[in-house]
Amino acid sequence: MSKKLPTQAKTASEVAKSVADTALKLGAKVETAQRMAVLAQKSILIRHMAKIRTMSKLTQEQLAERSGMPVSWIIKIEELDDQEKLTLGEFRQYVEGLGLKAVVRIERCNQLGPAKGG
């Protein structure tokens, strides 16, 4: 019996756009749709990071020790509890505890229009 190849997964950006588009179609305000899109991206990212932790055979306690974060924070992050309050610094600590490096890239978004000033 041959295994079926999985269809290509959507990227976090594609999921976020889909969430925002759906929210707008359902009558949500633009700000609400944008917030929902950001939360969708964070959820995907955190699930991937938690999977990396488990594949690395690290417990939440071990990750907490390696990252310098309290175990309660690791649990909150992985349970997606209060993820709106997850700071970039906390995410960096979590990622570095996994032995990875977090790199942030900032790009101009055409939707915002030209920068003010000169």
Image (cartoon, rainbow, N blue to C red):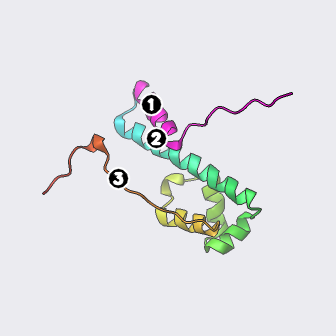
> Which of these two is toward me, 115 or 75?
115
Amino acid type assigned to the residue bearing label 3 in the image: Glu
What residue did someone put label 2 on?
Answer: 37
Callout 3 touching callout 2 (CB < 8 Å): no
Q: What residue appears at the point 41 percent right and 37 percent down from the top-left corner?
A: 33
What residue did someone put label 1 on?
Answer: 23
Q: What residue appears at the point 48 percent right and 42 percent down from the top-left corner?
A: 13
Residue 1 disc label: none
Is residue 21 within the magenta segment?
A: yes
Q: What residue appears at the point 41 percent right and 57 percent down from the top-left corner?
A: 105
Q: CA distance from mark 1 to mark 3?
A: 25 Å
Look at the image and tell me in which quarter the C terminus lies: bottom left
Q: Position of residue 87 (x, y in %)?
A: 48, 61
Q: Is residue 9 left or right of residue 115?
A: right
Residue lying farthest to the right in this orientation? 1
Query: Dot 1, crowdedness within 10 Å: few (<14), some or many (≥20)?
Result: some
Query: Dot 3, crowdedness within 10 Å: few (<14), some or many (≥20)?
Result: few
Mark 2 residue element = helix
Residue lying farthest to the left in this orientation? 118
Q: Is residue 5 left or right of residue 13?
A: right
Callout 2 touching callout 1 (CB < 8 Å): yes
